[in-house]
Image: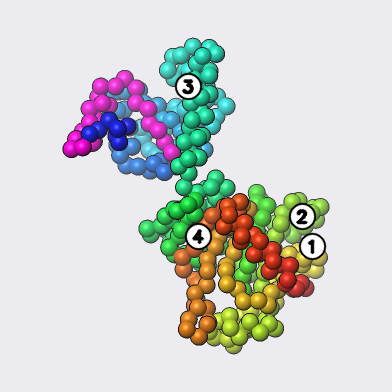
């Protein structure tokens, strides 16, 4: 390990290259964090050029690992910690016999991998897929996300079309929860996500919507809060009523989906979106007159619904939902 075996003042890359020249087999440990590391690929190419045996060792689930790397890795058979064949692949790769002793060592090794991954996990496992989607969007990745206490902090991108697209893609066909604590929800009903409502329409004929919990909260256009929800009240109320009209047209006479829409009258002091077991969260900022500033492209957070912070958001959302009125 470079942190332990390379001393202060030593040239790190020279020492690694020296050991690659001396080795018979190079094991490349790929994780979701280092998979695009140029140094890792350089070292793989250098070893391959010396006709060394190169074995990619995959520590994260990713069926498309070949897509992130180029030669020489796409010609080397990998060992995948999560495959059922891991033990057999491991024994064959290192010419070991299958015995109770080697089996117990490998099982212990896998346990230590899982313990180490959990210890150093930056975000709860429930949110990893969504975070991975967001990281691929350049709009969100300028100096972000950064992680603290298993919360991913994005410095920009909130309420953008790209964020909504990632949310819908994460939910479609495999998701169980989609809760939205919005005001106008204009991006959702602008015509870009018809596939979502076609999908929900089909699911609505199944008992209990086939296990899907879909909820959308609109601000009630007749509530007093409308006058404090936006700096330009006249335009805001018109846009709110127009979007509600679009939502009603989209849902039509579907009685099951109609129950998924409610309107609240309280002041929205937190913005909460639940996508399965992930929470996307932001807090509005108010000017000196108490009017909320525009949130588009602001910072936001992502964390697990099962975390302490996530549980509070679920509790808050449910409280607003229970006090809201049906939209249809």
Callout 1: 10 Å neighbours few (<14), some, many (20+)?
some
Q: Please name the residue shown 69% across and 63% down the image.
A: 318
Tag 1 and tag 3, C-beta contact below 8 Å? no
Closer to the chain start, of discs 1 and 2, is 2
Q: Does residue 216 appear anywhere in the picture?
A: yes
**Left or right, residue 22 beside residue 290:** left
Mark drawn on residue 90: 3
Task: Give x and y (percent) for residue 29.
Answer: 40, 33
- Residue indicated by mark 1: 256
- Find numbered disc 2 in the image and state the secondary structure of the residue it sits on: helix
Closer to the chain start, of discs 3 and 2, is 3
Callout 4: 10 Å neighbours few (<14), some, many (20+)?
some
Closer to the chain start, of discs 4 and 3, is 3
Disc 4 to disc 3, how far (Cα)? 39 Å
Dot in front, 1 or 4? 4
Callout 2: 10 Å neighbours few (<14), some, many (20+)?
some
Task: Give x and y (percent) for residue 9.
Answer: 18, 38
Task: Give x and y (percent) for residue 219.
Answer: 66, 76
The quadrant of the image that shows the N terminus is top left
User: Which of the 4 image quarters holds residue 220?
Assistant: bottom right
Closer to the chain start, of discs 2 and 4, is 2
- Residue indicated by mark 2: 209
Dot in front, 2 or 4? 4
Q: Is residue 162 above or below residue 50?
A: below
- Find numbered disc 4 in the image and state the secondary structure of the residue it sits on: strand
Numbered range of the magenta stretch: 8-32
Callout 3: 10 Å neighbours few (<14), some, many (20+)?
some
Q: Is residue 169 above or below residue 100?
A: below
Disc 2 to disc 4, how far (Cα)? 29 Å
């Amino acid at each position: 390990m470079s942190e332990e075996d390379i001393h202060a003042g030593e040239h790190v890359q020279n020492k690694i290259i020296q050991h690659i020249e001396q080795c018979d087999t190079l094991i490349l440990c790929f994780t979701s964090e280092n998979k695009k590391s140029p140094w890792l690929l350089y070292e793989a190419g250098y070893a391959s050029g010396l006709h060394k045996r190169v074995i990619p060792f995959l520590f994260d689930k990713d069926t498309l690992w070949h897509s992130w790397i180029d030669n020489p890795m796409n010609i080397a058979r990998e060992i995948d910690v999560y495959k059922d064949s891991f033990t057999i692949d491991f024994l064959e790769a290192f010419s070991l016999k299958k015995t109770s002793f080697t089996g117990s060592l490998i099982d212990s090794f896998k346990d230590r991998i899982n313990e180490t991954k959990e210890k150093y996990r930056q975000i709860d496992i429930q949110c990893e897929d969504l975070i991975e989607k967001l990281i691929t969007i350049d709009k969100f990745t300028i100096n972000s996300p950064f992680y603290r206490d298993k919360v991913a902090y994005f410095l920009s991108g909130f309420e953008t079309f790209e964020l909504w697209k990632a949310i819908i893609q994460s939910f479609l066909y495999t998701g169980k929860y989609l809760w939205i604590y919005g005001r106008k929800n204009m991006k959702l009903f602008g015509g870009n996500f018809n596939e979502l409502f076609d999908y929900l329409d089909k699911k609505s004929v199944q008992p209990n919507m086939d296990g899907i919990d879909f909820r959308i909260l609109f601000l009630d256009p007749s509530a007093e809060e409308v006058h404090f929800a936006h700096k330009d009240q006249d335009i805001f109320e018109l846009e709110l009523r127009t979007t509600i009209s679009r939502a009603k047209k989209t849902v039509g006479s579907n009685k099951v989906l109609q129950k998924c829409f409610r309107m609240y009258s309280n002041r929205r002091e937190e913005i909460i979106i639940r996508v399965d077991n992930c929470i996307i969260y932001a807090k509005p900022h108010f000017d000196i007159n108490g009017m909320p500033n525009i949130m588009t492209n602001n910072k936001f957070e992502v964390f697990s619904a099962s975390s302490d912070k996530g549980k509070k958001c679920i509790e808050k959302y449910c409280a607003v939902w229970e006090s809201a009125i049906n939209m249809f």
